[in-house]
Amino acid sequence: MRIIESGRSCNNCSRKNCFINKYCSEEWKSFLTDHKTSYLIEPGEKIFSKGQQVKGVYTVFSGFIKVSDFDDKSERIVDLVTKEHILGYRALGESVNVYSVTAESLSESEITFFPADIFRIAVESNKELVRFIINLLAMKLRRSEIRYKNFQKMHALDKLICSLNDIIETFGMEKEDETRLNFSLSRKDIAGLAATTYETVIRILGDLDKRNYIKIDGKEIKILDRKYFAENAKKLMTL
């Protein structure tokens, strides 16, 4: 990670949907600005790793990031993160000493770091920020429970449909070409997100291409029928 001397203040940041911009007072934005550090992250570089001592939380100014858990056999991608989102929120509790997941940059990304003690003070002093954190934790937990329960009974095609819809919803589409994802995960990462194998991903993507739901363009994936993924994912992920 390389430190960026951007001089960017939270008070005039262009990321209007950033949780700090939305839920902190002007006074606390100034306070956080005085204590933050911005970094440039290269693709494949880890921001923090599972088991590493908690140092603080991060906001994402730009780029695409995956959050993963690991076992002895494979990587399981548990979240996708892009601009205006928070990283490391799982470690906000004072009793939590280590990160429970690993965050890795998928592209060149710019992130901002806030020391844990500084961020906790800001949370305690901004009621709207407290509500945001509580709602975020509740939403992520609920989503994880639904995903875990439903993925156990899904076929590989269903899991891939849900995972591609997650990528569409999180990373979005290019303005110049609304069929092209802003960022296409590698086939290996799609397998980690869909809880299946690399070979299965290749086979199903090829089938979806033949059925004209997607178009494989080299390493990238074009989404030709977003409605297909949105409607099926909604049905499949309902308890």
Image: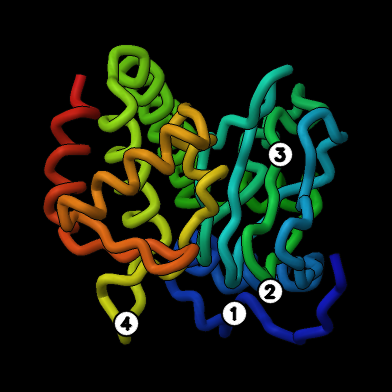
Q: Position of residue 224 (x, y in %)?
A: 20, 63
- Other residues around mark 2 within 10 Å, as few (<14) / some (14–19) / many (≥20): some
Amino acid type at circle 2 is Ser
- Residue 232 can be seen, yes or no: yes
Secondary element at tag 1: helix
* Location of mark 4 (residue): 175
Alpha carbons under labels 1 and 2: distance apart:
6 Å
Residue plotted at (81% across, 52% down): 115
- The quadrant in which residue 180 appears is bottom left
* Location of mark 1 (residue): 11
When the figure is inspected, residue 7 is found, relative to residue 37, above or below; the finding is: below
Q: Position of residue 219 (x, y in %)?
A: 49, 63
Q: Position of residue 10 (x, y in %)?
A: 62, 75
Where residue 102 is drawn, which disc sits there? 3
- Other residues around mark 4 within 10 Å, as few (<14) / some (14–19) / many (≥20): few
Amino acid type at circle 1 is Asn
Where residue 30 is drawn, which disc sits there? 2
- Other residues around mark 1 within 10 Å, as few (<14) / some (14–19) / many (≥20): some
> If the image is split into quadrants, where does the C terminus sit?
top left
Callout in the foreground (4, 2): 4
Lateral position of residue 233 relative to residue 108, left or right: left
Residue plotted at (32% across, 48% down): 206
Alpha carbons under labels 1 and 3: distance apart:
30 Å
Q: Are marks 4 and 1 in contact (CB under 8 Å)?
A: no
Alpha carbons under labels 4 and 1: distance apart:
28 Å
Alpha carbons under labels 4 and 3: distance apart:
30 Å
> If the image is split into quadrants, where does the N terminus sit?
bottom right
Mark 1 vs mark 3: which is more N-terminal? Answer: 1
Secondary element at tag 2: helix
Amino acid type at circle 4 is Lys
Secondary element at tag 3: strand
Callout in the foreground (1, 3): 3
